[in-house]
Amino acid sequence: MPLDVQTLLKRFREGDRVALSRVISLVENDHPSSPVILDTLYPFTGKALRVGVTGPPGAGKSTLVDHVAARMRTDSQKVGIVAVDPTSPFSGGALLGDRVRMSSVNLDDGVFIRSMASRGSSGGLAWKTFEVCEVLDAFGVDRIIVETVGVGQGELEIADEAHSTVVVLVPESGDGVQAMKAGLMEIGDIFVINKSDRESADTARRMLDSALELKPVKNGWRPPVLSTVALKGEGVEELHRKIEEHLRLLVTSGSIQHRRMEGVRAKIVEILRNRIIQSAWERNKLGRLIDAEVVSVMAGGSTPYKSAAEILRKTGQ
Amino acid sequence: MERKVRVLVAKPGLDGHDRGAKVVASALRDAGMEVIYTGLHQTPEMIVEAAVQEDVDVVGLSILSGAHMTLLPRVVQLLREKGVDDVLVVGGGIIPEADAEELASAGIARIFGPGCPTSEIASYIKDWFETSERAGV
């Protein structure tokens, strides 16, 4: 049966979750219908606020997301969750296990959880995470929680995609606080020391808090350091309160609107760049020219730089 | 990019043994599939909701408790009620051959018993996927 995108989108607009799920797949897989889908849905986007949750593997991100989503539901907010886990660079496969921890909201029809494999993206998210968030936004969710893969220090893409970023650490991360200054420490709007029933938790929290004191206050917001015990749900109320407080600040200060404008610009640039490269590539039959130059370099007759210059000369660039 | 096959691996019912499910989940991951693992003690309703949200191509159910004649057909029935009829449902665990035949007529395409090589499961899924309606989208 051929795919009927218009019927699918009609069902989507009527709130059909099977249609939502199918639309997400088409967008995630970069199906030829994806641009039409995103164009059609675009007028319905711009309402959902996005919360990013990041931190090292096993810190308790998924369990916290589960609790925060459940808390958002008590305010009757509809919630979308996008949980990213890594794709194996060896097999191309992935084991997506974040749902295991999300048992308190997985039968709630006000919550939609989607697991995504990173598929070669190295920034802690998947290539199409942003587009999937747009689809959820158009479906009418109020909040989108994006959980990154377990990160080290350099996977910071979430800070661009989320309005508010929560960095989840554990008491044992304390010793590494200094080392993290150039990475995770810079993107957190809210820091959480999870597993705070452990002995060293209070020290870790104070060390992190004092390290953050050295940072200038940005847009009237000083990132708080919170303590949680995700397994017992402790500290979730305070975490949720801080998330909402930060989001409110972003809305009232106009920062969200500004971010959206920047996002639109970046998106147009990205699409243009891809199209321009693709059309120049095909017009000039670059593949064939490159093949010839590779042979020449391997035979010792050229170097990669000389070859690139030669290709540009031949194509009149 | 090659379209990834998405598989839900779930444990319906109350038995607490998920070693087999994990072995199969890892093997399918190593075969290049995206495996959504949902853990122990899932009701058919939870499994079907996860299958819908994740838009999986395949649902793999591992069951050792003996309740397979009740729980497995229920999963297929709930999927159909949601209008999802293009998904492959397979099972594994301790399931007598006679039961497997009856399950086949209830929509569980294949039962993989103890001792079945994981490569056989992966190639069965790949063969099914290539000819399925879902391959193009």
Image (cartoon, rainbow, N blue to C red):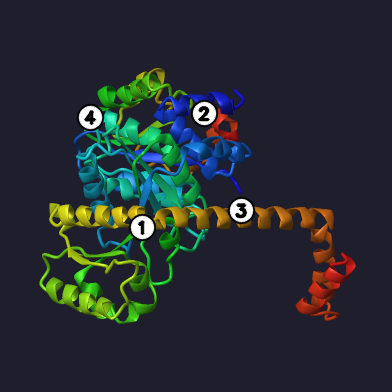
* C-alpha distance separating marks 3 and 4: 56 Å
Ranked by sequence position, the earlier of labels 1 and 3 is: 1
Q: Badge 2: how crowded within 10 Å, few (<14), some, or many (20+)? A: some
Amino acid type at image mark 2: Leu
Of the pair A68 and B121, the residue shown nearer to us: A68
Q: Tell me where residue A210 sits by quadrant.
A: bottom left
Element carrying mark 4 = loop
Please give the name of the residue rendered at 28% of the width and 81% of the height, measured from the top-left corner: A214
Disc 4 is attached to a residue of which chain? B
Ranked by sequence position, the earlier of labels 1 and 2 is: 2
Of the pair B4 and B49, the residue shown nearer to us: B49
Comparing labels 1 and 3, the label whose residue is closer to the camera: 1
**Residue tagged 1:** A253
A232 in relation to A308, above or below: above
Please give the name of the residue rendered at 41% of the width and 54% of the height, measured from the top-left corner: A256
Q: Are marks 1 and 4 on the same chain?
A: no
* C-alpha distance separating marks 1 and 3: 25 Å
